[in-house]
Amino acid sequence: MNSLSKENYLKALFHLANHKNEILVKDLSDTLGIRMPSVNSMMKKFAAEGWVVFESYKPIILTEEGRRKAALIVRKHRLTEMFLVEKMGFGWEQVHNIAEELEHIQSEQFFDKIDQLLNFPKADPHGSPIPDKEGNIIKTNYFKLSECEEGSQVKFVALNSSSDDFLRFLNNKKLALGTEIQILETESFDKSKKVSYDGITETFSIVVLEKILVEKL
């Protein structure tokens, strides 16, 4: 079993498990861009390793061991992104593809050193929690900005989407993690919201609001 391919499958399972109640073969196929027969074959191998519970035509269940292994790959990716931003001066919109390559380095010592150099960060540049060395991950209780009521004051703490295009959009709007946002008005027709932050007033569409995660102040 190719190690890089295996890790990509595990990481995809991890992300799908965090966003869906059940994972279907089609979900993995769509996420990875791999034909369904190939996904079926890989899931049978994963089941033999004890990483998933898998039966044809039924949802895929990530086992505790599978979740732990997947979380450790996510840990490497998020630590790498943080290192690229904090120590090498990359923008948060520039690091995903580089981290996709570096996350497959097998040396635990390498990533432990990065963790130490960064003073053991709890989250990556996009606000996503970084799993610890045992694969444990902090549970967050954030809200989508779309869920916030008029008059509320919130802090921008994470993202529901970290696509390069969306990150560049936020850069253009001068909206960064840690920014305090006030909800001024909600448009009843399309659910867009007028907000203010750092002396700036903007109106964001529901598409944007769904991608911004906040905590209430």
Image (tube, grey):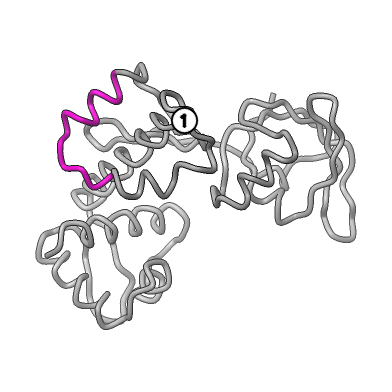
Query: Relative to 46, is 215 above or below?
Result: above
Residue 162 placed where, x, y %? Answer: 54, 48
Residue 212 placed where, x, y %? Answer: 64, 43
Residue 125 placed where, x, y %? Answer: 49, 33
Q: Which residue is drawn at 84% across and 31% down?
A: 200
- Residue 205 part of the magenta-drawn span: no
Quadrant location of residue 145?
top right
* Overall secondary structure of the magenta section: helix
Is 114 placed left or right of 17 in the picture?
left
Query: Label 1 is placed on what type of residue?
Result: Val
Query: Relative to 6, is 174 above or below?
Result: above
Q: Nearer the viewer, residue 52 or 106?
A: 106
Query: Relative to 126, is 115 above or below?
Result: above
- The span picked out in magenta is 103-116
Q: Residue at x 23, y 47 (%)?
A: 104
Element under disc 1: helix
- Residue 114 part of the magenta-drawn span: yes
Q: Residue at x 75, y 55 (%)?
A: 206
Residue 81 placed where, x, y %? Answer: 41, 36
Residue indicated by mark 1: 85
Q: Nearer the viewer, residue 212 or 171?
A: 171
Is 71 placed left or right of 188 in the picture?
left
Within-10-Å neighbours for mark 1: few <14, some 14–19, many 20+ = some
Q: Which of 55 and 46 is in front in this view?
A: 46
Quadrant location of residue 184?
top right
